[in-house]
Image (cartoon, rainbow, N blue to C red):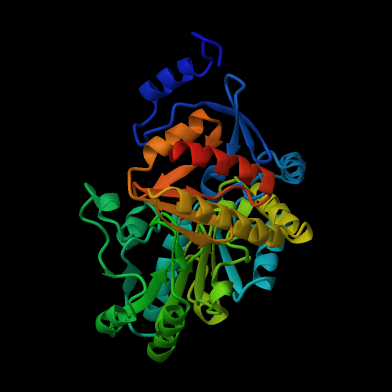
């Protein structure tokens, strides 16, 4: 940055005046990205270990996605879900081909995907003549979104503060505690909603045995199992969907974040027997699954597949985790390193925000959840040499 003059400053001053004050933004104005690198308005470059919060899995300005987008933008952007379109159909078929599910509902965000899942679970039991079976068991420390339905499903009080009355019908249990579910589950429970690895909650994974027990309990009671794979899906953990690591399949799954490499999209996937509770008129959206975003999503998924990016994620993820663990040995302020693939967390015994700021100053974008857990979710195309650079930076700022 040139001394005394910044191209970023004026934008930050205006933004702080005219935008809703919903974010405490870091003092940087990004203007361009390429692969794992971002540039700010002053031309300073940054290595991106956040990827727009686990969104840009193929990196920024991916040429394939850019070409698919511009081709589709010149062909057909939107017509509404009153008609069939080709990219939407191809994307749904791809997802069905690569998952447990038989049907897909497209929407525009993670919260909307979870809304669709909650509505489907309730309607499934209404249709079966069990109208009182509407309650959903959700996990403490979970995150499912900011709409009324999804914040009601979220197990963090700070997200609900100031918005009462919230939606009725959600019960909370500690994560990884099967006894707590046994105690709470009743003839009013329609579904168990959970992340297989809690992202916003601090990169906390379900125990494999626990997840199998949850599945078994759902089978025995006829309860639906909903996996929120909005953060963990689309290769982030080294499998297409994180539940593949555990060998447990849900009845409903929600996706969003990385599905279209940065374009807004959400998806709710379900088995046929569950999906059939949605009939014409049950649920709808104007923008969900437009030709434009679904063309981007299709290109994203095909690229992940053809370039073996998920295998790469698993390999560099292990390397990254090992290097973070080596930092733990050198710096007592690091309490724990955890995560799978490129969804990694480093728990500190101090506040994490000053470290996020210090990394930013040195040209590295990282993020902090729950106040003291550094989260690393770079594009899946990140290279070991780029990880090495971040490790050197962390080694300095942890001092
Ligand atoms: C980000 C996220 C959501 C919410 O997605 P939005 O697109 O912000 O609505 C829901 N669940 C999980 C697990 C997430 O990580």
Above or below 45: residue 355: below
Q: Position of residue 255 (x, y in %)?
A: 54, 60
- The quarter in which the C terminus is drawn is top left
Residue 172, image quadrant = bottom left
The residue drawn where x is 36% and y is 85% is 129
Of residues 66 and 9, the one nearer the viewer is 9
288 relative to 207 in the view: left or right: right
- The quarter in which the N terminus is drawn is top right
Above or below 398: residue 296: below
Question: Outermost residue toward the top?
Answer: 4
Residue 106, image quadrant = bottom right
Question: Outermost residue toward the bottom?
Answer: 220
Q: Position of residue 151 (x, y in %)?
A: 33, 56
Above or below 228: residue 132: below
Judge whether residue 82 can be spotted in this image: no
Above or below 345: residue 24: above
Image quadrant of ligand 1 equals bottom left
Of residues 49 and 67, the one nearer the viewer is 49
183 relative to 241 in the view: left or right: left
The residue drawn where x is 31% and y is 61% is 155
Judge whether residue 39 can be spotted in this image: yes
The residue drawn where x is 39% and y is 28% is 19
Q: Count of labels shown? A: 0
Question: Outermost residue toward the front?
Answer: 330
Q: Position of residue 316 (x, y in %)?
A: 65, 56
Of residues 335 and 219, the one nearer the viewer is 335
Q: Position of residue 362 (x, y in %)?
A: 53, 30
């Amino acid at each position: 940055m040139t001394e005394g003059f910044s191209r970023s400053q004026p934008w930050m001053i205006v933004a702080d005046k005219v935008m809703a004050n919903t974010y405490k933004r870091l003092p940087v104005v990004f203007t361009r990205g390429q692969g794992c690198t971002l540039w700010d308005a002053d031309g300073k470059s940054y290595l991106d270990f956040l990827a727009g919060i686990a969104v840009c899995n193929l990196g920024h300005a991916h040429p394939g996605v850019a070409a698919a987008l511009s081709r589709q933008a010149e062909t057909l952007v939107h017509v509404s879900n009153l008609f069939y379109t080709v990219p939407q159909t191809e994307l749904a078929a791809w997802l069905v081909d690569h998952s447990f599910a038989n049907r897909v509902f497209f929407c525009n965000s993670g919260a909307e995907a979870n809304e669709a899942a909650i509505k489907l679970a309730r309607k499934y039991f209404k249709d079966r003549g069990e109208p009182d079976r509407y309650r959903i068991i959700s996990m403490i420390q979970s995150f499912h979104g900011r709409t009324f339905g999804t914040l009601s499903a979220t197990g963090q009080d700070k997200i609900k503060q100031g918005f009462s009355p919230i939606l009725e019908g959600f019960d909370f249990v500690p994560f990884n505690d099967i006894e707590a579910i046994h105690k709470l589950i009743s003839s009013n429970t329609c579904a168990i909603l959970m992340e297989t690895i809690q992202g916003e909650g601090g990169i906390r994974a379900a125990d494999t045995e626990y997840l199998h027990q949850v599945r078994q309990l759902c089978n025995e009671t006829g309860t639906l199992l909903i996996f929120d794979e909005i953060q963990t899906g689309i290769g982030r953990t080294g499998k297409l969907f994180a539940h593949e690591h555990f060998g447990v399949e849900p009845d409903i799954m929600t996706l969003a974040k990385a599905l279209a490499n940065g374009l807004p999209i959400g998806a709710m996937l379900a088995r046929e027997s569950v999906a059939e509770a949605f009939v014409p008129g049950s649920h709808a959206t104007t923008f969900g699954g437009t030709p434009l975003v679904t063309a981007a999503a299709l290109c994203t998924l095909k690229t992940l597949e053809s370039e073996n990016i998920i295998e790469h994620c698993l390999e560099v993820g292990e390397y990254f985790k090992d290097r973070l663990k080596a930092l733990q040995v050198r710096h007592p302020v690091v309490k724990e390193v955890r995560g799978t693939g490129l969804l990694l967390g480093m728990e500190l015994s101090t506040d994490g925000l000053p470290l996020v700021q210090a990394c930013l100053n040195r040209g590295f974008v990282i993020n902090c959840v729950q106040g003291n857990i550094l989260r690393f979710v770079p594009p899946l195309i990140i290279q070991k040499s780029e990880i090495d650079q971040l490790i050197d930076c962390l080694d300095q700022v942890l001092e």
